[in-house]
Structures are given as C-alpha cells and as structure tokens.
Amino acid sequence: MAFDPDVITMQDAKNGYIPTNLSDEIITNVKTGSAIMKLAKARPMTKPREEFTFMSGVGAYWVDEGNKISTSKPTWLKGTIEAHKMAVIIPTTKENLNQSVSNFFELMRPEIAEAFYKKFDQAAMFGTDSPYPQSLIGSALLAKQTTTETANKYEDVSAAMEFLEDNDLDANAIAAPRSQRRKYRSTKDEQGLPIFTSAHDNAPADLLGLPIAWAPKDSWDTTKADEFVANWDDVQYGILNGIEYEILTEATLTSIKDENGDPINLAERDMVALKATFSPAFLVLRDESVSAVVPTDGKGVASKKAARRKVVKHDILNPDEDATVGSGESADAGK
C-alpha cells in the first residue's frame, strides 16, 4: 500500500519527512512569523554550504570619440552561506498518534512554526545560542554603526539611517519589537508631525517612510537592541530541504520543565513528543548594510569576522576558482 498521509496514522509513521504540502505550509508560517524572513532576501540552497562570488567597485566612464575606453577594476568578493540543523521538541498526548499523518501535523503546525521562527530570529538578530558566524547586532557593532537610544525616536532612527547613507546605501525597512510602538506614537518629527503610521488597508506600519516588521516578544532581546535599520537586500537567508520528524516515546525532556521545574519523563506521564528538524541558513553580506539603535548599557557582541572575503587573484571569466585571502578579512564592499 502506498503511503497516504490522509490514511496512515502516526502510530505507523513515527519518523521520516513531513509530507511536502504540510511541510510547505509550516515553512510558510515560519516565514510569516519571522521578522528576519519577512525582510531579508531569500537565497535558494541545494547543499548545506554554498559559496558565491560578487563584484564591488565597477564604474562607468565618459569616452571621447576615438579615445581608448577605460576598463573598470572591480573588487571580487566571496560570501559563504551555511545551513544548520535546528530541532524542536513538542510534547503531546499518546492519543494523538491515532490521528492520520495529515491531521496530526495540521494540529501541530502552529507550534512547530512558532518554535522555529523564534529560535531562528534570536540567532539571526542577536547571536543567541547561534551556529552562525554573524548576527544583525554583531554586524552593526563590527561596522561601528550603533546609536544609543534617546527619548526621541525620530532622532534615533534618523541617526541609524545616516550610517547606511554614509556608505551610499539606502535603508529600506526596520525590524523592531511591538513594545516600541508606544514610543513611536508619542514622537513627532521636526515639523511636529507623527513619524509613525499604523498598518492600514493591507499596508504595513511604517516609521519615517520605512515599513516595520514586528518581532514577537520572545524573539527580541531588549538588552541588546531596540531597532534594526538595514538595507535588507544584503541580509540573506536560505532553507535547505524539508522538515524531518521523529516521534519520541521513552525520552526524558531535560529542556522542558513541568510545573515543579523538573524534566518531563514521557513514559511516566503516558505522553509522546514530536521532534522536528529544520535547516535554515543566515548571512549578512555587508556589515555596513546594518545599523542598530541600542540601549545605554547594550550587551550585544560584535561579530568576529565578516562572511565575505576579498578575492586576491581573479580570472573575471571564472571567479569561483580564485585564490582568496583568509576568511577574516573584510573588504570595503559598502563604500
């Protein structure tokens, strides 16, 4: 009998990949819930680690009739994006194993998606328990593009935008926690006009003309940043493959506590748990493309190195085979 998720129960399908249509729905929910994925540029991935090459510094020239045409001398840069496996464990009752695979994952879909996007945003924005070499706060600190929060959000966000403009880049959106809304509502610009516009007619909320992606409370670390202002084309993410799962029946869940603060033993409680794994990737292409408004005693940590690196010897027709300098070298890509 062929596998039919509408007929086969979870009791008979305790591990494998979530069916494509259900996996796609969960991933869509992750993208909708994640502040990073709402704003960043998606990069297709076919393998866990991918390197790509791009140019910076290409120029144009005026040419008089009969004169030799000048040639640009671009800087070749390499970036690396790598997917890392993330796992979530969600306890549930044994009775749910009697449901069909389709019904079971439809039931668990909101919990799976929420766990994934919160964990991903924490890592991508703040480097919290993160496998990635970069984070938004790390890039802003590495590029020295942070401004300390004041009582005037107009001045704060304007100052954050100026960092990008100094590098000839345009900010195109803001990421912020919903707790900032009350500050936005009370701030006026230099002409005494509101700087904040609430969402209306399917248009997102915006601040100084920049759309805002709100991050859930559990995704945002207020000790490290208040807002991120960025050119989000240079913030990229990828998703490798679908979502794999396993039903746990005998495990003790040390990362999940009961009402007394003790680990949950599934067998003792006559429960099972769903373990789902998902492999997202994250990269900031140019640190200069990210700035942050931070609290006075901000606890963010700068990234140790940029993901991109300068290509020293290059063949323009085949740049992917070029020799490169060490991975810690940063090129002036944003200038």
Image (cartoon, rainbow, N blue to C red):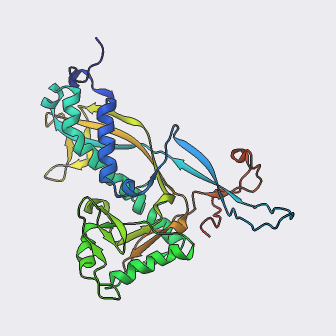
x and y percent of residue 65 in the render? 83, 65
Question: Residue furthest toward the front?
Answer: 65
The N terminus, quarter of image? top left
Is residue 16 shown left or right of residue 91? right
Apparent side of residue 106 relative to residue 138 in the rendered image (left or right): left
In the picture shown, does residue 222 fall above or below 202?
below
| Rendered residue at 54%/71% (across/down) | 143
The residue sitting at 33% across, 67% down in the picture is 176
Residue 247 visible: yes
Indicate left or right for 26 with 302 as reference: left
Front-most of 56 and 133? 56
Q: How many marks?
A: 0
Question: Residue at horizontal 63%, vertical 60%?
Answer: 328
Quadrant occupied by the C terminus: bottom right
- Residue name at image x 27 percent, y 49 percent: 114
Farthest residue, direction bottom: 191
Q: Quarter-wise, where is residue 91 in the image? A: top left
Indicate the position of residue 305 as horizontal and vertical percent values. Answer: 57, 62
Q: Is residue 253 visible?
A: no
146 is higher (above) or lower (below) than 110: below
Classify 159 as above or below 91.
Answer: below
Furthest toward the top, the residue is 1
Q: Position of residue 203 (x, y in %)?
A: 28, 61
How far from the left and from the top, in percent, is residue 231?
48, 64
